Image (cartoon, grey):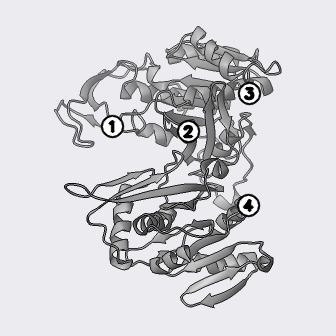
Amino acid sequence: MAKKQKTVYMCSECGNEYLSWQGQCSYCGSWNTIVEHRISGLKEPAADTRRRTGTEGRPVKLGSVGTSEYERMSSGIGELDRVLGGGIVLGSLVLISGEPGIGKSTVIAQAANNVAQRYGTVMYVSGEESEEQVKLRADRVCTSGGDPSSSISESLYIYPETSIENILATCEEMKPCFLIIDSIQTMYSSEADSVAGSVTQIRACSNLLIRFAKTNNVPVFIVAHVTKSGELAGPKTIEHMVDCVLSFTGERDRDLRILRSYKNRFGTTDEIGAFRMTSGGLIEVADLSGSLIESDAKEEGSVISAVYEGSRPVFFEIQALVTPANVGFARRTAVGINYNRINMILAVLEKKAGINLLNHDVYVNVVGGMNTGSTATDLAAALAIYSSYSGKTPSRRIVAAGEVGLTGCLRSIPNADRIVQEAVRLGYEAVILPERNARHAAEAGKVRLSDNGRTVTVTPAGAEDGSGIRIIGAANLSDAIRAYLQ
C-alpha cells in the first residue's frame, strides 16, 4: 500500500526538518535556507532489507563471534592504500571531498584504471563531465606522461548518467568490481520529489548506494562537494552512513596535496597520504618529511618541528617573524597553525620568558603548505618566535616538539620515540622534548641518561665519536630556550 504524500520544510545547509516554513534555521543559524520538499508516495518493500541476517536477529555472546580479516584490493596507489588502512575493503563506501580543482577526480581516475587492470570491470559514473572530458583527463593521468607500458584499461567504463536507478540497473547487468560516483550532488532519484543536490536527494541516493554496496560486496567511491567554509556539503548523516571519510586538501599555488582520513571503520583515523600534482597526474610522496624541509633551519626565527600523523612522523619547518608595530594595534597572523594557540603561546612567552610583544607584530607560518592541528608544534612555534625576537640562532640542527601549558611547563606528546628515530634518519644533531618524553626515549633506546640541572640530557651510545643524536628533555619553556640557544 502506498504511503500518503507528505510535505516537509528542510534546511538546505544542515538538513534539519520543520513542520512549517520559517526564515532562520534554529539548528545551524542560516537564513533563507528552509525550502519545501514533497515526499512522494512509495510502496512498502516486500521484505525488510535493513535487517542484518548474520545472527538471524538473535542476541549472541560477543566473545563467541568469530573475527576475520576484511578482504581488500589494492588501488595501485600506495598513499591511498595507506590512508584506507591497507587497501579498498570490498563492500565499503568511501566518501572523498575537497575543493574544486584540488585533484579528487584525478586520484580517483588513476585508482580506477589500476583496479581495472588488476581485478576486472570498473564503472566510472560521471554526472558533471562528458565522456570526452573524462577521456582527456584519463589520457593525461593514466598513461604516465606517455609511457608506452601504461595505458587505459579495457575494463574501465565511463557512464555519464545522473539517475541513480539507471546507474544501479546498469551495475546489476555489468557486475562491476568497483563503482565510482562523481559526484553525489549531481545524482537524483525518482523516489524523492526534489531537485538534484538537495538534502533529500543526497540522502535518498546515498541510501540506495549503501544497499547496493552491502548486497553485492562492491566497493563504492563517492565524490562530494564542499561548502565555502571547507566543510562537506549535504546532510551530516551521510558522514555517519559511509564507512570512510577522506578529505583532499592543498594550496592552489603549491603542488603538494594531502589526503587525510577523518573516519575509517577498517583502519586508523588521522592517517595522511602525500601527493604532488604534476602535468601527468598525482605522484606519491614517500618521504614527506624530506620534501617539506629545504633548509637546515639554522636561520633566525626558523625551527624544525614534528608531529605523528597516523603511522608515520612528519617533519616540517615553522617560521616566525617578530617586527615592531607601526601604527595601531599589533597584528597576529598564523598560517598552517591554530590562531588561538599562537595567542596563548605569546601570552606564555611574555609571562614566563620575560619578553614584551605588546607592540610587536607576530607572523607564524608552517612552510610547505602543511596544516597541523597538533599541540606538539607549540614548543617549536614558541622557540621560533623567541629566536626572531632576540635575533639569536642555534649552532646545531635541532628538532623541537612538545605541548606548552599555560604555566610554562612542557607537556608530553605521543610517539616521541618514533620522532627521535626519524630525526636520526634525517641527520639532526639534537631533539628538544618534554622531560617525560626524554626519559621514555632513553629507556626505549637503551642509552645513558645524566642529569644536568633541571634539564635531562640523553646521549646515545656511540655519540662520543660524533655519531648519534642528543635528546634534551626540558621541564619548562625557559629550559627549552636555554637548550635551544646553547
Q: Residues within 10 Å of mark 3 (few under 14, many from 20)?
A: many
Q: Secondary structure at mark 1?
A: loop
Q: CA distance from mark 3 to mark 4?
A: 32 Å
Report the residue at 50% width, 81% height from top: 479
Identify which residue, 298 or 111, lies in the foreground: 298
Q: Earlier in the sequence, mark 1 or mark 4?
A: 1
- Disc 3 versus disc 2: nearer the observer: 3
| Image coords of residue 110 (percent x, y) | 67, 27
Quarter of the C terminus within the rendering? bottom right
Q: Which residue is mark 2?
A: 51
Q: Amino acid at mark 4?
A: Arg
Which disc number belongs to residue 425? 4
Report the residue at 24% width, 37% height from top: 30
Q: CA distance from mark 4 to mark 2?
A: 52 Å
Q: CA distance from mark 1 to mark 2?
A: 28 Å
Q: Which residue is mark 1?
A: 14
| Image coords of residue 353 (percent x, y) | 39, 77
Q: Are marks 1 and 4 in contact (CB under 8 Å)?
A: no
Identify which residue, 130 or 4, lies in the foreground: 130
